[in-house]
Amino acid sequence: MVHKRTTSDHRGFNAGTPAPKLSAEAAAEFLQTGNITGYDKSLLLGLITEMKTYSEKFQHLRGTPKISIFGSARTQPEHPDYLLCHDFANKLVQDFGYDVITGAGPGIMEAGNKGAGKDHAIGLNISLPFEQDANPYLKDERLITFYYFLIRKLAFVREADGIVLFPGGFGTMDEGFEALTLIQTGRAIPVPVVMMEHKGGTFWGKVIELMYHLRDQGTVSRPDLDLVYYTTDIDDAIKYINDFYYRYHSMRYLENGDAVIRLNRDVPSNLLQELEVKYVDLLKGSKFKVHDKPLPEEVDEPDLKELHRIEFSIDHTKPVDLYAMIRDLNTKYQDGQATNAQEAHKFPRPSRVKVPSSSPTLAETE
């Protein structure tokens, strides 16, 4: 079952921590009082206007799951990464019903949109001094041109059910690491993140070495590295993404700080018991509550009312543990077969990336 987004799907960026609230009336009064300087007012109005435009344009695009693809604008059509991205996007659309989001430019972005086809390609362009023209594989109604990078990056992450990174430059690194940071800190709802390149490629090996160096220096934790998955195989990448939604559908936070996970499939009771033990700190010692109908706070998401869900207390300082628990929730006891999520989706050791083998996506146990 492929994850199905709805027009009301709740995508909070506050991870259960209270976000600043300001009514429309108070915001209007604030802008009219003169207590805000000219540039600050111009910036604020520009951000609000761009957010309004983006939100309005995406209203009719939220009925299908989406994958955001990042990668270099300089990748040429004959390059194996361009061809891989094209075929990957095509299979996402044709076989699994996804839409594909890119930055609307040339290179990898063009490959993703071309592979998806105009009816399933979405472009988030950026207005730059050196004008980046949108690639020709986008319909006008599925193309948004942004002025502010921050709103554009918000859209890339907020609208995505998965993020795939192909080799790229500063922009790709910025977008990829920001997505990982948002998931790592709990500011974004968890989604699968994949690093992808052609078989025999060496681009991501050096980046992965850097990430292990950060781990060795103590600036990231070992579990943080499991937030991203490396592969050179289209089917493997799609399986990794789809596995994330084997049971998990979506989640949201309640006013009391608890979390609710909506389910594509019921969860075996023995698996819930295992998760309660393994993630006792994340769950603050609580037990899962199983519901067969929406909670009162979910009335704004009527399209999800048929889904069963599990409610639980959560330690909001452990978003990486939440990500790991969702992986276990999905990958253990699939179709009656016990699977170790951590072993199935280990982050690859640098040596395995630099020296491709017949199974380059399998990580060695540390």
Image: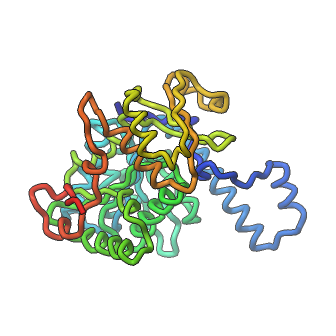
Q: Nearer the viewer, residue 222 or 197?
A: 222
Q: Is residue 55 left or right of residue 288?
A: right
Q: Is residue 145 left or right of residue 191?
A: right
Question: Is residue 7 depicted above or below 321 in this figure?
Answer: above
Q: Nearer the viewer, residue 41 or 159?
A: 159
Residue at the left extreme of this rendering: 358
Q: Nearer the viewer, residue 319 or 233?
A: 319
User: Can you tell which quarter of the image residue 221 is in?
Assistant: bottom left
Image position, residue 347 (x, y; %): 29, 59
User: Can you tell which quarter of the image residue 259 is in?
Assistant: top right
Q: Residue at x 77, y 67 (%)?
A: 41
Image position, residue 243 (x, y; %): 32, 40
Q: Is residue 346 left or right of residue 161?
A: left
Q: Residue at x 36, y 62 (%)?
A: 225
Coloring applied to the structure: rainbow
| Quadrant (top left, top right, bottom left, bottom right) of the C terminus | bottom left
Question: Is residue 284 depicted above or below 220 in this figure?
Answer: above
Q: Residue at x 23, y 32 (%)?
A: 337
Residue 179 seen: yes
Image position, residue 246 (x, y; %): 35, 35
Q: Nearer the viewer, residue 133 or 38?
A: 38
Image position, residue 54 (x, y; %): 58, 51
| Quadrant (top left, top right, bottom left, bottom right) of the N terminus | top left
Q: Residue at x 26, y 28 (%)?
A: 336
Residue 138 seen: no
Question: Is residue 342 depicted above or below 355 in this figure?
Answer: above
Total marks drawn? 0
